[in-house]
């Protein structure tokens, strides 16, 4: 067997290479700049700079497409088409907003990350590290690796490459989850859980990919799609493989019953990390699922539809019902994320062309609202015993009366919640409308009805928080949450996301146009 | 041509934004600014109404159509027929009066500012909904309106206001989300394309009987919740009891009309066959609403709940008038939508004034007020009799038109419903008797009579009802052509079928 060096057209990968290359450089910065304060500034500048430059390149590429479908980077393996460019741009935006949140500090100079990740929680060493003013600025290169991996994830057309990219963005996330400054045990537990379950799901994915390869003797998506047509009777190995591959991706989307990591990780991770991964992981995994379904498994649409229906319905039901009974705001939003994963899967019904517009739009609106909502959570703090700024006030009761103390934060939070609930004139409504349209176009009436019922129940817990913030007075003498005198960076993020939610809710045409022209997947092999 | 409708929507919305942007020092002037905005709004409406071509009242006038979200077929399309014009008028008239009636409900400057801004925002939505000529736009405004209303009910009112606000929101959301499915499906049933949701493009489309019926139900349930039709009415008494009376007045007098308005302009127009199909059942529920609402009104001890139940009864009459598909009955229903707005708003205002004076909405705490506050008592009696459809006051005209128009085709329904006229006299007169006659309650001795502000809020409505009671033609001219068109449209479809 001859080994032929593959031809790779590197140019279309420029944005990804910039992000990953900068990540490597950023690690060197860690080694060479000693002063934590300087290092933070440099890292933040470099990170945001790299993401912006990459975004610029994505836009240039987009304009350069000029109606053509895109470029094949490596035949059958990597394709940069309009669809993937749209996802990449979205991920870069999430990355930029995430980096801003990572860098935000409270008025007494604390960021969200532990000063030294390697020391045991509560130990003397930890106190020493804190006193010495150490900072874990590695989160910035980790963020870059994650964003780069996710971007790569959206343009891969090969089951093995997909696995590599999956691990590339997952590993940095596992580490970031473990780095919370407060409640470190919870954070480390979350990271371990995420890592173990993530490894488990990767294994399932890999096993599935092997079975698909066994059944079709093909590993790139398009060839699989073609080969499936030639397999008589849709044999069991193929189906089992396809189900396992899809399940591996659904794990990353956070759909039930693959959701058990979601609440713990959302709760335990440093909130800026939750914000970023809540938005970006879902988007990247959805992008990959789109490619897998539309390129490879479309002949199995009918056979796999039971799975999509079952998982979508389970996610919506479990997500909404569990969110109803949560008392921790991060866990509540985590279960709401599970319900949203269900809504996302609704759009896959029938694999309609409409879904190729609906999904990116939905993920964009959901991601922006998620980042905004978690950014607000970082700002609502408890009063520490010494009168300073304490941990985040995550118990729902602590949010009572926030509307009076901080109309800006409470108003923005209400806006994000309304967007989650899909109330018109917010972006969430247009997203929901698009998803429902796609599902009805795919003939999935009953699924849409379930989604509607889930939306009604979900509205109840979103509204409950609004009631708490605006109509409930904080009980006298209780440890009422205080709204921190905010870091500008977080305010900027909240402002940007809130404005985007309103604009996308009232005038979504421009963005819909972009996604509409991106609604084609480039077919290369033929 | 001047885009009247867009400006009528934008003006209060901008006003609301301006109030929120107001510096703290100027906040004490929020009421004056808000009232000023609504007066300008009313003036603008008056100018528009004068240009309305009465001779062609059935046609959509002041049309504006702009592309909004072409990807999903939504347009910014506005326009009013005679019925729409009256409804927009109702919003333009009642909002400033409601503001005056609730002028002193709040004392804290920030809360006053918030209240006024939310009322302005609701006005923008009301006008938008009555003027919308695009189903998507209609739906968006219909749902988005819940947000300011939710804050109005939940933020200002009685002890149980939060419960009332959540109940209101959940009921409305249930209706709204069912309607959402129907709206999405309509895109695929209709012609599609960039103007898929224009009502004109959705008129007379071919679809299977089952599809039409399901879609009809999707819309109708939402409207029946809004219009409170038994058995979907239970949110209204709760909200009426807890929300400030000036808010409830707007809610019942204007916003709930969206239900009946939607039935006429959307259900009948887009789903004529399904409307025919469902009519018998709907008429039964309408008659039940008429009688049940009236009976419960008699049994109420709380005046706000009482007025709410009278409205359930009156909405039943309107729905009956719509679904018998007779020109006169339809005219009566459309006219009733307007007249009931005047009458109910006045009633809620007056009850609100009474509660403001004594702090109690319970009938049992009152007695003998006639001699203490004679002007108040007289105003209350006139407004009350308008609710009981006394001849000479405008609601009488519309109610009698519904009954006469419906009689040839729905004799039993009309005969049963007509009992409500007697019941109405009962609940109004019993209330009057309890509150204003009999031995004076000593604690009420010093009660003040209507102030100038309160007269300014209520008397214009009384005058309007008297004028329209004696010269009903003034309003009928606006509704007869569109009503006849709606009925003809439904019957034509029946003939074709």
Image: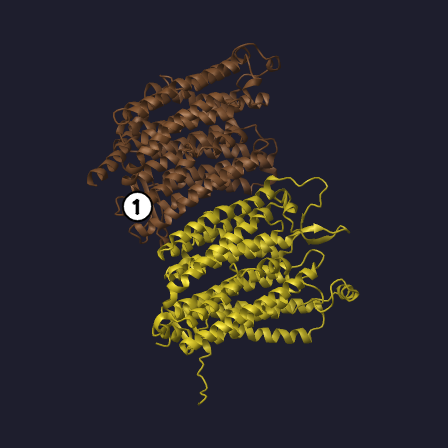
Q: Which chain is brown?
A: B
Count every numbered label the image shows and give the total. Answer: 1
Residue A249 versus residue B309 in the image, above or below: below
Q: Which is more toward the observer, B97 or A455?
A: A455
What residue would you read off at disc 1? Answer: B210
Q: Secondary structure at mark 1?
A: helix
Can residue A219 be seen by looking at this rendering? no
Q: Which chain is yellow?
A: A
What is the quadrant of residue B259 in the picture?
top left
Q: Residue at x 58, y 21 (%)?
A: B357
Residue B371 versus residue B163 in the image, above or below: above
Residue A307 at x, y percent in the picture: 44, 61
Mark 1 — on which chain does it sit?
Answer: B
Residue A73 versus residue A486 in the image, above or below: below
Residue A345 versus residue B447 in the image, above or below: below
Residue A98 at x, y percent in the picture: 58, 62
Q: Residue at x 31, y 54 (%)?
A: B193
Q: Which is more toward the observer, B264 or B460?
A: B264
Q: Residues within 10 Å of mark 1 (few under 14, many from 20)?
A: few
């Amino acid at each position: 067997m001859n080994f032929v060096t593959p031809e790779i057209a590197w140019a279309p990968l420029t944005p990804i290479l910039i992000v990953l290359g900068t990540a490597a450089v950023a690690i060197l910065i860690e080694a060479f700049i000693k002063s934590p304060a300087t290092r933070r500034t440099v890292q933040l500048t470099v990170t945001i700079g790299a993401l912006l430059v990459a975004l610029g390149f994505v836009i240039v590429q987009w304009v350069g497409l000029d109606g053509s479908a895109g470029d094949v980077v490596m035949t059958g393996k990597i394709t940069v088409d309009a669809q993937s460019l749209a996802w990449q741009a979205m991920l870069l935006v999430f990355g930029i907003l995430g980096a801003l949140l990572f860098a935000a500090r409270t008025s007494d100079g604390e960021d969200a990350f532990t000063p030294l990740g390697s020391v045991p929680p509560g130990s003397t060493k930890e106190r020493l590290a804190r006193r010495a003013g150490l900072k874990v600025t590695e989160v910035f290169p980790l963020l870059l690796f994650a964003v780069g991996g996710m971007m790569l994830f959206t343009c891969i057309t090969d089951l093995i490459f997909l696995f590599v990219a999956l691990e590339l963005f997952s590993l940095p996330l596992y580490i970031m989850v473990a780095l919370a400054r407060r409640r470190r045990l919870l954070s480390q537990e979350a990271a371990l859980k995420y890592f173990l379950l993530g490894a488990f799901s990767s294994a399932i994915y890999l096993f599935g990919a092997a079975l698909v390869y066994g059944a079709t003797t093909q590993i790139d998506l398009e060839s699989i799609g073609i080969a499936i047509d030639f397999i008589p009777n849709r044999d069991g190995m193929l189906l089992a493989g396809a189900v396992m591959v899809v399940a591996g991706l659904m794990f990353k989307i956070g759909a039930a019953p693959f959701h058990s990591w979601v609440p713990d990780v959302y709760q335990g991770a440093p909130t800026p990390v939750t914000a970023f991964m809540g938005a970006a992981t879902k988007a990247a995994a959805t992008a990959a699922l789109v490619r897998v379904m539309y390129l490879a498994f479309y002949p199995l649409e009918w056979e796999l539809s039971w799975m999509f229906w079952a998982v979508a319905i389970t996610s919506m039901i479990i997500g909404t019902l569990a969110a109803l009974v949560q008392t921790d705001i991060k866990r509540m939003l985590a279960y709401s994320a599970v319900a949203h994963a269900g809504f996302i899967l609704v759009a896959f019904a029938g694999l309609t062309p409409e879904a190729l517009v609906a999904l990116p739009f939905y993920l964009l609106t959901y991601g922006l609202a998620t980042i905004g909502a978690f950014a607000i959570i970082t700002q609502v703090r408890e009063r520490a015993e010494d009168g300073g700024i304490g941990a985040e006030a995550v118990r729902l009761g602590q949010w009572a009366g926030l509307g009076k103390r901080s109309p800006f934060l409470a108003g923005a939070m209400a806006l994000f919640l309304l967007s989650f609930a899909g109330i018109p004139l917010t972006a969430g409504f247009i997203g929901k409308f698009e998803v429902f349209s796609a599902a009805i176009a795919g003939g999935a009436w009953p699924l849409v009805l379930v989604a509607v019922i889930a939306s009604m129940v979900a509205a109840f817990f979103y509204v409950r928080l609004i009631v708490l913030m605006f109509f409930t007075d904080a009980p006298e003498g209780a440890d009422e949450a205080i709204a921190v005198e905010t870091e500008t960076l977080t305010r900027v993020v909240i402002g940007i996301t809130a404005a985007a939610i309103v604009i996308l809710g009232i005038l979504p045409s421009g963005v819909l146009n972009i996604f509409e022209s991106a609604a084609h997947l480039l077919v290369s092999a033929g | 041509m001047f885009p009247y409708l867009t400006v009528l929507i934008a003006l209060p919305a901008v006003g609301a934004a301006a109030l929120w942007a107001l510096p703290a020092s100027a906040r004490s002037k929020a009421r004056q600014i808000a009232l000023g905005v609504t007066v300008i709004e009313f003036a603008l409406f008056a100018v528009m109404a004068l240009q309305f071509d009465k001779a062609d009242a059935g046609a959509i006038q002041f049309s504006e159509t702009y592309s909004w979200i072409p990807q999903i077929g939504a347009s910014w399309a506005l326009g009013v027929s005679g019925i729409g014009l009256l409804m927009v008028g109702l919003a333009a008239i009642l909002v400033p009066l409601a503001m005056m009636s609730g002028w002193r409900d709040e004392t804290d400057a920030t809360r006053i500012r918030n209240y006024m801004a939310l009322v302005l925002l609701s006005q923008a939505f009301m006008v938008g909904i009555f003027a919308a000529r695009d189903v998507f736009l209609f739906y968006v405004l219909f749902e988005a309106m819940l947000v300011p209303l939710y804050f109005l009910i939940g933020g200002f009112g009685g002890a149980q206001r939060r419960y009332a606000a959540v109940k209101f929101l959940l009921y409305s959301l249930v209706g709204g989300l069912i309607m959402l499915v129907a709206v999405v499906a309509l895109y695929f049933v209709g012609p599609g394309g960039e103007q898929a949701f224009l009502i004109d493009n959705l008129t007379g489309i071919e679809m299977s009987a089952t599809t039409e019926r399901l879609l009809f139900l999707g819309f109708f349930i939402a409207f029946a919740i809004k219009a409170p039709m038994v058995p979907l009415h239970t949110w209204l008494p709760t909200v009426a009891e807890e929300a400030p009376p000036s808010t409830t007045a707007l809610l019942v007098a204007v916003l709930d009309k969206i239900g009946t308005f939607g039935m006429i302009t959307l259900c009948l127009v887009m789903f004529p066959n399904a409307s025919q199909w469902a009519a018998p059942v709907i008429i039964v529920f309408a008659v039940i609403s008429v009688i049940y609402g009236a009976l419960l009104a008699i049994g109420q001890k709380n005046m706000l709940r009482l007025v709410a139940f009278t409205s359930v009864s009156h909405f039943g009459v309107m729905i009956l008038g719509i679904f018998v598909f007779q020109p006169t009955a339809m005219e009566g229903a459309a006219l009733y939508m307007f007249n009931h707005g005047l009458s109910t708003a006045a009633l809620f205002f007056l009850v609100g004034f009474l509660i403001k004076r004594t702090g109690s909405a319970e009938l049992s705490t009152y007695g003998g007020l006639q001699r203490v506050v004679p002007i108040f008592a007289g105003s209350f009696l006139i407004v009350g009799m308008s609710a009981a459809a006394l001849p000479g006051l405008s609601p009488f005209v519309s109610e009698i038109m519904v009954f006469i128009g419906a009689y040839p085709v729905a004799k039993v329904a009309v005969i049963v419903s007509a009992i409500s006229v007697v019941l109405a006299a009962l609940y109004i007169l019993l209330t009057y008797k309890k509150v204003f006659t009999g031995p004076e309650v000593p604690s009420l001795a010093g009660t003040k009579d209507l102030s100038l502000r309160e007269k300014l809020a209520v008397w214009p409505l009384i005058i309007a009802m008297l004028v329209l009671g004696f010269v009903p033609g003034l309003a009928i001219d606006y509704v007869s052509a569109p009503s006849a068109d709606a009925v003809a449209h439904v019957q034509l479809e029946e003939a074709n079928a």
